[in-house]
Amino acid sequence: MDFGLSEEQELLQETLRGFLSKECPASRSREIFDAGAGHDAALWSGLAEMGFVGLNIPAEYGGAGMEVLDLALVCEILGESGAPVPFFGHVMASLALIQGGSEEQKSLWLPSLAAGEKIASIALCEAEGEWVPEQWQCGVAGDRVSGSKSFVPNADVADLLVVGVAGGGLVLVETGAEGVNVENLDGIDRSRPVFRVEFDEAPSSPLETGGDVARAVSDAGLAMLAADAFGAASHLIDLAVEYAKTREQFGQKIAQFQAVKHQIARLALDIEPSRALYWYGAYAVEHLPEDGPRAAALAKSHITDRALSAARAVVELHGGLGFTWECDVQMGFKRLMFDRGFLGTPAALRDRCAVLAGW
Amino acid sequence: MDLEYTEQYQVYREEVRRFLKGWPLTGEEADRPGAAGSFRKRGIEAGFVCRNVPTEYGGAGQEPDALKDAIVRQEFYAARAPGDLTSQGAGLLVPTLLEFGTEAQKKRFIPKALADEERWCQGYSEPGSGSDLASLQCRATLDGDDYVLSGQKIWTSNAREADWMFGLFRTDPSASKHAGISYLLVDMKTPGVEVRPLKEMTGGMEFNEIFFNDARVPAENLVGKPGEGWAVSRATLVHERNLIANPNMMRDTFNDLLDLARRVEINGRPALEDRALRQRLVEIEGYVRTGETSSMLQFTAGVRGEPLKAMRPMMMGKLYSTDTMQRIQKCAYDLLGAEGMLAPASEDVAGWGRKVTATGWVEAYIFSMGPSIAGGASNIQLNIIGERGYGLPRDMRPPSS
Ligand SMILES: Cc1cc2nc3c(=O)[nH]c(=O)nc-3n(C[C@H](O)[C@H](O)[C@H](O)COP(=O)(O)OP(=O)(O)OC[C@H]3O[C@@H](n4cnc5c(N)ncnc54)[C@H](O)[C@@H]3O)c2cc1C
């Protein structure tokens, strides 16, 4: 019975944090953010060289063979720095491949995904929020898929998409193939842009086990988004602490006002203990099948909801500056808007938690 | 991370369970007065209760092992069996004496507190000194081999039932605020100690005022050195906050809330089917689950000997728990209809107990504010989190005069 990180896991987080503070300081995130490019190719290759992008891919395919919890730990740090990289969609897609791919599909794709030479992403949502396999309508006829997917992260740079189809199955589609059309949806989080992808009889190749894999991958995704939100919110709280210690009004640091100190303490109280909630969710999706799906949904609904409220308060604590585009707070804030919506809003996930509890 | 227990501990859990087959007691034994106490005693002999207290002080004298502690706690809790007491005596005084007491004090006081043969109350707060406890005015003046006590304590829980009090007194008015305070053990039967009941807003009668009129207490009842009372009391306070930050209690009360939601109706259907309520319940459960998992995290950090890694969640524990309990109680109260206008019946006024009746919930709704005030009010907790957790500046102090 040990509910803590291993030394390797702590080192993983420290290494990534160190790397990002050098290679992706706020000024760099900001450049990408302002340009609307949504992807820092140099940063991505750096992460790939260090083995982060293939973290969960089995060693036989060139990855590190690590667990969902490790992915979530990485997401926490990416959330802190707001790194503009296609990590989330990439690992979601590789999870699907690992769990549902044939030997041939795996050997074809996983080595280049592990090396980061190819980028993958995941296309689950239809219309304005149909994330659940039972809702999907994209049709497969023979080896061709037709239909429309929305909120596909980083589809513009992806080589491969894992696409959810009618019946709850998943198919692989190469973005370069005929009949694939990618359109930028102008997402609010410029560190992870989202796209609509139309498939018009695009060539596809099915993964083996449909619905279960889609569910399992989504559950892992929920835990990762909870972690990302935890990281982003923790970073925003750090920004608030720093700002309160430097900004002066009425002849003193604003942190000297108890109202400000208590406001910050309340934000921290709402966020810091929930580190354990995302750890548990990420661990449970892999090791506690009875509890995993619910634990992940609870973690994601709770943390993203609390985090976004915290982010609003952090904007206020920065005053007029906080309301500007120039202030870095907006980047974390918008990261959280992605985390909140992707794979289901807090309200939708709470409905699911109630059902899963048998209420 | 591994939430499985290794075989050694699974075996231990089986041992505990085997022992707990003896609870609840049956037949004649169950009817005897002090039945719970005799079962607890058996638990000490078996090595499960008071595990970490040496045998010479009436404990089980087991090797320290936090995992075994946890297993015992879980199993006794699940069986609702009388295990370690969380009373002021066993829960607060005993760990404090183990840390600061003289050999004679340990021998004299710990066994009786553990056996619940002597009850204790905590005499800290005074009418003018609550959050600013170090401003306390109750005097203890050395006169020969005795301290002579004068002044008043207030909001003292369970003082009428108590045989003894541990309390803070000013022994050196010329020393600075914190340095002039000492920690004393006071026999409640001492002439010159007068207890007057205070009624709480729930209708309960746990509160008291205590007046000291030249009550004489032997100087050997001083814990720590004169002027060290503040440091000694901080140790007690840590235990008090840990007792309040109890995730089992959150989970139990949340489950009681679910039962309530199954019983009462909204629009002619069980309330639990109402979407708005389900949303709210899951939202509250997010806090409950966070409290549970965060206490697992803190526990592991402790077992690994790295408590500093869990410093922030640890200092948040009390406020997180009392806020969560308040959320649960507000939700329960919203489920009560006109019954929410009823006064708690006398049997409801049990404080921390489990809730079944509507008026029991009314009592709990009111009671849940208490822990937010006791043991350091919420604003004080926020100061601690901000200042020690995040390095924000301390409140401005009045100029020392
Ligand atoms: C259920 C219950 C049981 C208790 N049992 C005991 C007991 O057994 N023994 C015992 O000694 N005492 C006991 N107490 C008393 C308790 O310890 C005090 O009530 C508590 O410390 C607060 O002190 P106070 O009542 O003087 O409030 P005050 O300190 O006067 O506080 C009033 C309000 O002002 C706020 N405040 C105070 N200082 C600050 C600050 N620096 N910054 C911001 N806000 C501030 C507080 O948060 C509070 O909201 C109990 C209280 C309760 C409710």
Image: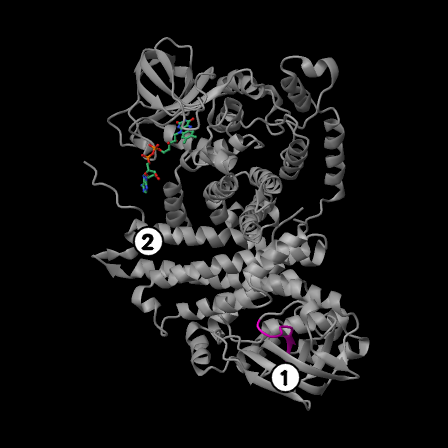
- Counting from the top left corner in percent of width and height, residue B257 is at 57, 40
Q: Is A135 left or right of A205, judged from the image as shown?
A: left
Q: Earlier in the sequence, mark 2 or mark 1?
A: 1
**Location of mark 1 (residue):** A198
Report if the CB atoms under discs 2 and 1 are less than 8 Å apart.
no
Q: Residue furthest bottom?
A: A178
- Counting from the top left corner in percent of width and height, residue B10 is at 75, 40
Q: Is B32 left or right of B223, judged from the image as shown?
A: right
User: Main structural element of the magenta stretch: helix, strand or loop?
Assistant: loop
- Counting from the top left corner in percent of width and height, residue A176 is at 66, 89
Amino acid type, callout 1: Glu
**Location of mark 2 (residue):** A260
The answer to whether one can see residue B238 in this image is no
Among the 4 quarters of the image, the one containing residue A184:
bottom right
The chain ID associated with circle 2 is A
Amino acid type, callout 2: Val
Distance from Cα at disc 2 to Cα at disc 1 = 49 Å
**Residue A158 part of the magenta-drawn span:** no
Residue at (75%, 80%) from the top-left corner?
A140
Along the line of sight, which residue is nearer the eye, A99 or A54?
A: A99
Q: Residue furthest top?
A: B191
Mark sitting on residue A142: none
The chain ID associated with circle 1 is A
Range drawn in magenta: A119-128
Among the 4 quarters of the image, the one containing residue A199:
bottom right
Q: In which quadrant of this rendering is ligand 1 seen?
A: top left
Residue at (36%, 13%) from the top-left corner?
B194
Against A358, residue A43 (above or below) is: below
Q: Secondary structure at mark 2?
A: helix
Residue at (33%, 63%) from the top-left corner?
A318
Residue at (66%, 31%) from the top-left corner?
B76
